[in-house]
Amino acid sequence: MSLIASIIIGAIAGFLAGKIMKGGGFGFVLNLILGVVGGIVGGWVFSLFGIHSDGGFIGSLVTAVVGSVIVLWIASILKK
């Protein structure tokens, strides 16, 4: 997947994770940045469980959303 596609998927995932984590968001722009980081984290977490996202756009988006929720959750703990 290209770098631009990864950034776009991460940005969408950050937006969705911000909606999922009610009260855990950090604003639109920071949620998008954390979404890109979350895409990397999601891929790492899924690989720990032996799950590999070969599902194209949807699989990558699900992986990135899961990672983004994890990153937002950790960031909200550190924020307090």
Image (spheres, grey):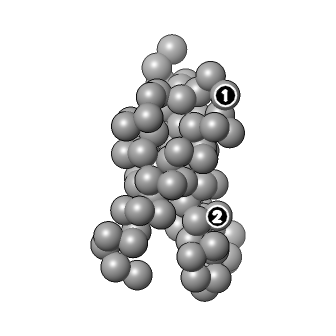
Q: Earlier in the sequence, mark 1 or mark 2?
A: 1
The residue under the point 44% across, 28% down is 27
Q: Residue furthest left?
A: 3
The residue under the point 40% across, 68% down is 6
Looking at the picture, does residue 35 appear above or below residue 56? above
Residue 67, horizontal then vertical, whole percent: 56, 54
- Disc 1: which residue: 22
Label 1 Cα crowd, 10 Å radius (few <14 / some 14-19 / many 20+): few
- Disc 2: which residue: 62
Q: Which mark is residue 50?
A: none
Q: Are dots 1 and 2 in contact, CB under 8 Å? A: no
Which quarter of the picture shows residue 33? top left
Dividing the image into 4 quarters, which one contains the N terminus?
Answer: bottom left
Label 2 Cα crowd, 10 Å radius (few <14 / some 14-19 / many 20+): some
In space, the residues marked 1 and 2 are separated at their CA atoms by 18 Å
Residue 30, horizontal then vertical, whole percent: 38, 36
Q: Is residue 67 visible?
A: no
Which residue occupies the foreground of this view, 23 or 38?
Answer: 23
The residue under the point 63% across, 74% down is 59
Which residue occupies the foreground of this view, 21 or 80?
Answer: 21
Q: Identify residue type, mark 2.
A: Val
The residue under the point 31% across, 72% down is 3
